[in-house]
Image: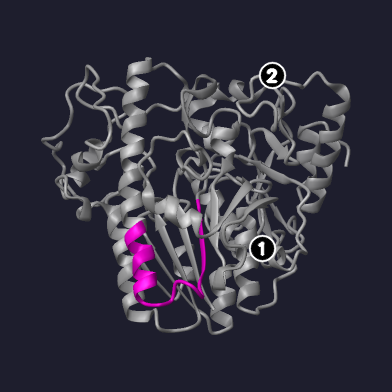
Amino acid sequence: MRTILVLIDTLRRDALNCYNQESDVIAPNFNEFANNSTVFNQHWIGSAPCMPARRDILTGRMNFLERSWGPIEAFDKTLPEILKENNVFSHISTDHCHYMRLGGEGYLQLFNTWDYLRGQEGDPWISSIDDPLNMPKSYYGRVRKQYQLNRNKWQDNPQQYPSPQTYISGMDWLEQNGNNKDFFLMVEAFDPHEPFDVPKKYLDMYPKEDIDRDYFEIPVYGQNEYTKSQMDYLKTRYKALLSMTDEYFGKFIDKLKELNIYEDSLIIVTTDHGFFFGEHDYVGKNVMPMYNELSHLPLIVHFPEGDLKGQKIDQITQNIDIMPTILEYNDIEIPSSVKGKSWKNLIEDNYNKEYALFGYHGLQMNITDGKYVYLKAPREDNQPLFEYTTSLTGIRGYLGSGKEEIETGHYIKRSKYPVYKIPVDIPKQIQSEKTKLSLIMKSYLFDLNNDYKQVENLIDDDRLRSLMDQLLIKALIDNDSPKEQFDRFDLKD
């Protein structure tokens, strides 16, 4: 079976017309693909942000309950490895620079082959001791010297930007290998992730937005400190970047059709997380409650031979379902460790998922039943909290640095390896911004159908809160949560 995953970073659900008819984002290729595929209305985030989300995808289970941002674990059963064992070739084309930084080890190496396109964000690519000549003199948000060096390489030429090159890489791979009947191709584009750097060609598609400084492409995460005009400027750059993404996504789909392999392929298009552009008075991600703008995701699937074509699916789905879906379409047994459910069961009318559990390690615990969304704050001390891992690398250095209390043992039942048990005071995701822990110390409960913008907090409804607590307990048990997660939220397992 030909299976293809197109993973598009930071793709907001409401940017696409299939979810929001009022969207002014120019994205005709996404719209056409959605019209000829299956649109999922209840697709939710799992572990956040980038690398935790990718471990979810490749292992079919939640990363965030056990650890923060980090590599593939020694005990993980992964999609590419299982495919390889069953003679199904896998390849990834990506410009996602986090695979190459500390805490991103082991992902690309799972695939038979991989192609990495250089230059995104802080990718240490162009080497210069001196500052680049294009450093802006005035700016909002943040500026990275390394990115300014890198961006000199593409000089406003779309085909030189890393994400378009990623789609081109995927098309080149199909030219060489698309005639084969069994493969897994993952095309993973970093855009429209910030920095919202985009050629003038795409900015000209939208009304011109000006600011009074030279540069604003990377906002500071947290509470919104920008004016409406500054935020409108940033939104326009995001829309333009998505239009560029749409163009090259369209070229990729056209290549599948040109090679006559589109109709009988399983093609999954989704994202890892959304982004705040001032909603709920927040900007960015990571440090704030996981409102819908961040956690309710787009998912569009082209099933082989037109199965479910044109339908809208209201069943709850998550990215942990991708692994078992691809395995089942390849007639490969799904490991018992996998917690996701195969979407092939939708075609057979044998699919049911009661909830979507999601979160960042060490922050709020979140769940939805498709009717309500519950964002539960931890106890005031946010304790007890540990990370469990066979590797100490993380997003900003090594886990447990300077802690004598680190233990090792067989704390993960599914692992034959002993793991580190690392006490956590400040969750790794916000360790550089410790004061932002206060942003998640309040609980929220929202009616998804009648209050989608999440304005009215129903947390004082004791009956409803109790029901959601019980569902949360069930979800933690189902997903093999470490015991202290129950204690951290005062839940009785």
Question: Which amino acid, by three-letter code, is at mark 1?
Answer: Trp
Q: What number is the disc on residue 456? A: 2
Question: What color scheme is it?
Answer: one colour
Residue 195 visible in the current orientation: no
Q: Quadrant of residue 230?
A: top left
Q: Is residue 36 shown left or right of residue 291? A: left
Q: Residue at x 60, y 45 (%)?
A: 45
> Is residue 289 placed above or below 30 in the rendered structure?
above
How many badges with numbers are in the image?
2
Q: Which residue is mark 1?
A: 343
Query: Where does the C terminus fall, quadrant-wise?
Result: top right
Magenta-tinted stretch: 250-270
Mark 1 packing: few (<14 Cα in 10 Å), some, or many (20+)?
many
Residue 449 visible in the current orientation: yes
Is tag 2's residue or tag 1's residue first in the polypeptide sequence? 1
Q: Which secondary structure, mark 1?
A: loop
> Is residue 353 placed above or below 456 in the rendered structure?
below
Q: Residue at x 47, y 33 (%)?
A: 22
Q: Quadrant of residue 332?
A: bottom right
